Image: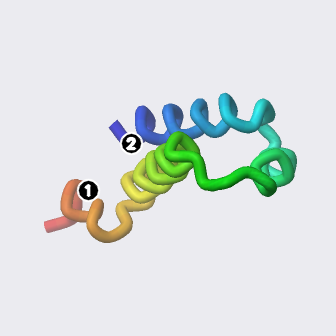
Amino acid sequence: MSSAFLLFGFSLLYGLSGSINLVTNRANLAGKEMDPLLLTAIVMTVIGFGFKVAAVPFHLWAPGRL
């Protein structure tokens, strides 16, 4: 599930900026206003990374040691 959020967020970022290079993405998106689709892409990417690293509050779903 975390990979789905992460990849969908990345695909939205690619669709908005037209590049997979993060430096180029920043330059392409710097002058634009905050588009709701850009906000959705950022949120989905952060959620995907949060699940991957088991950050709070996603740590509740991560397997732990007993």
Q: State the SS at label 1.
A: loop
Give the mark, 2 or 1, whose residue is nearer the N terminus.
Answer: 2
Left or right of 63 on screen, residue 39: right
Residue shown at 49%/41% (left/top)?
Answer: 6
Could you tell me if the residues under marks 2 and 1 are in contact, i.e. CB atoms within 8 Å? no
Left or right of 32 on screen, residue 52: left
Pointer 1: what residue?
A: 62
Q: State the SS at label 2.
A: helix
Dividing the picture into quarters, in which one does residue 2 lie?
top left
**Which three-letter amino acid code belongs to the residue tagged 1?**
Ala
Residue 38 position in % (x across, y down): 57, 45
For the C terminus, which image quadrant? bottom left
Between 36 and 22, which is closer to the camera in this rendering?
Answer: 36
* Separation (CA) of disc 2 from disc 1: 11 Å
**Which three-letter amino acid code belongs to the residue tagged 2?**
Ser
Residue 30's disc is none
Pointer 2: what residue?
A: 2
Between 47 and 51, which is closer to the camera in this rendering?
Answer: 47
Residue shown at 67%/54% (left/top)?
Answer: 33
Say how the picture is coloured: rainbow
Residue 1 position in % (x across, y down): 33, 36
Q: Is residue 31 above or below residue 59?
A: above
Left or right of 13 on screen, residue 26: right
How packed mark 1 is, by other alpha carbons closer than 10 Å (few <14, some 14-19, many 20 or more), is few
Q: Is residue 39 above or below residue 64?
A: above
Between 4 and 62, which is closer to the camera in this rendering?
Answer: 4
The residue at the far front in this view is: 33
Residue 65 position in % (x across, y down): 20, 65
